Image (cartoon, rainbow, N blue to C red):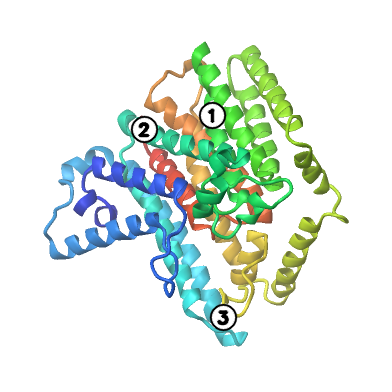
Amino acid sequence: MEKLLWNTGITNTNQNKLLLICGILLSAMLLPSLEIHKSLPRVRLDDALIFGAFGINLLLWLTRRFRTYPSYALESYNEGERRGMRAVTKVFLLLLASIIISNLFAVIFLAGSVGVRDVMEGVTLAKYYLAITLALSLNLRQGEFNVLRNTFLVGLGFILLLSWGQFLNLANVNAWLTPFFAQSHLDNLVNANPPRVLGTFDNPNVMGIVSVMMMTLFVTWFYFRNNDRLQAVILFIMIGLTLKQTFMTISRTALLATATVLTFLSVWAFFKVYWKKRVILKIGVLFLLTLTLFFTSPRDFVSRMNEATDLEKSTSAQGHFMRMGSAFEFIQQSPILGWGTAKDTMTTLVDNEYALVTRRYGVIGLAFYLWLFIRPVKAALRRIRFFHSYASEPGIREDKTLFSIAFVAATLAIIVYNITAGAFYNLQLMTLIALYMGLIYRTEGESD
């Protein structure tokens, strides 16, 4: 299977895979969906890269014009890939089976129907599967890791510049550039009080959770790595920038996710890291930084946060509960297998991805949906269990371990985010998560 997907055709070398992953990463970080024609659905560049590369590989494999790696080359380093490929395939087959069974049940017993939009659910699954397996197929050595890190930092740099430009409306950027990214939520930035920064995403909540995921990387390296003074200062600054960016989105869900991951990583660092005094100092410094950024935010920011604590007056919370409530009514009627995808007959606006998935595919589908996120966490924890801060040496082994720690924290953030929003059905956000998952799966069976 791994030979057919990515170890053949135009991605038969590690360098080509790396270039493709970098292109997909930058597309998912920086570009919105694009309109080809008014009569056609919008498309994403990362979709075109993923399906295009796979299609070319499949065509070349069918015509036998390209060979895969020699068997001895594959044997030398792909045990982690094989293990990861089996795990990923099982996860997606179980989720796909639950979707098919639920739709069949709905058609036969609930007088449901299956439309073209429902079939596109399979295309979405295929994209995520291909993105994960592509990242999984990359032999992640120090050189490849450095290229991915630098690509990520380039994307982050652009997002930070645009976010501050939107916040301050530098050069009237919200009139000529921001509309390219914010195609349906521009009003949240231009006319909202207070304005909510969108960055390169269409929704401030999505920008908020992406900022939290970025922050987990810097916090992990700040806590768990034995940095020199300059490295610690740089990481501290990057934590401050990503944290401030989260606050500028004024996303209450992202703020809750921030509190969750900072608490989780702080507790983990306190009990796992050898340098106790240093860790306590770092925890205290980050706590003060968070409080400073929070209480120096505009007054409207604090008032919006306080509004969330008064459920009787919070129109946003009431809207969430109303949309979730209608989903729970259907769940009570068909809790095991759900009502099928039913995009043409039921609303897709539920504001709680767990409720949406359960309404569509029942508790069985929800279990396999959760396993999609939990299974790579299991892979990350296998990598982390041998981590000892006092014996850790800089290099790819340490980088992969810290990467795994950050992934566990980022998954916690996604779990929180899905309570009032959803990652799975946001193609831009989930593409980033899928690449992250694939790299984690690859490290599971490796020894370096």
- Where in the figure is residue 339, as x and y percent of width and height? 61, 76
Image x and y of residue 370, in percent: 58, 55
Q: Label 1: which residue?
A: 218
Q: Which residue is drawn at 48% across and 28% down?
A: 386
Distance between the Cα atoms at labels 3 and 2? Answer: 46 Å
Residue 208 shows in this picture: yes
User: In this picture, is 401 found above or below 11?
Assistant: above
Can you identify the residue that label 2 sits on? 145
Sequence-wise, the earlier of marks 3 and 2 is: 3
Q: Nearer the viewer, mark 3 or mark 2?
A: 2
CB atoms of marks 1 and 2 within 8 Å:
no
Query: Residue 215 at what x, y percent from top left?
Result: 57, 34
Residue at the extreme front: 171
Label 1, secondary structure: give it: helix
Disc 3 packing (10 Å; few <14; some 14–19; many ≥20): some
Q: For the residue labelled by badge 2, is the local secondary structure a helix, a strand or a loop?
A: helix
Q: Which part of the image, by quadrant, shows the C terminus?
A: top left
Residue bearing the label numbered 3: 105
Q: Is residue 8 visible?
A: no
On the rendered structure, is 289 left or right of 207?
A: right
Front-most of residues 76 and 185: 185
Q: Tell me if label 1 and label 3 are in contact, CB under 8 Å.
A: no
State the residue in front, 304 or 2. 304
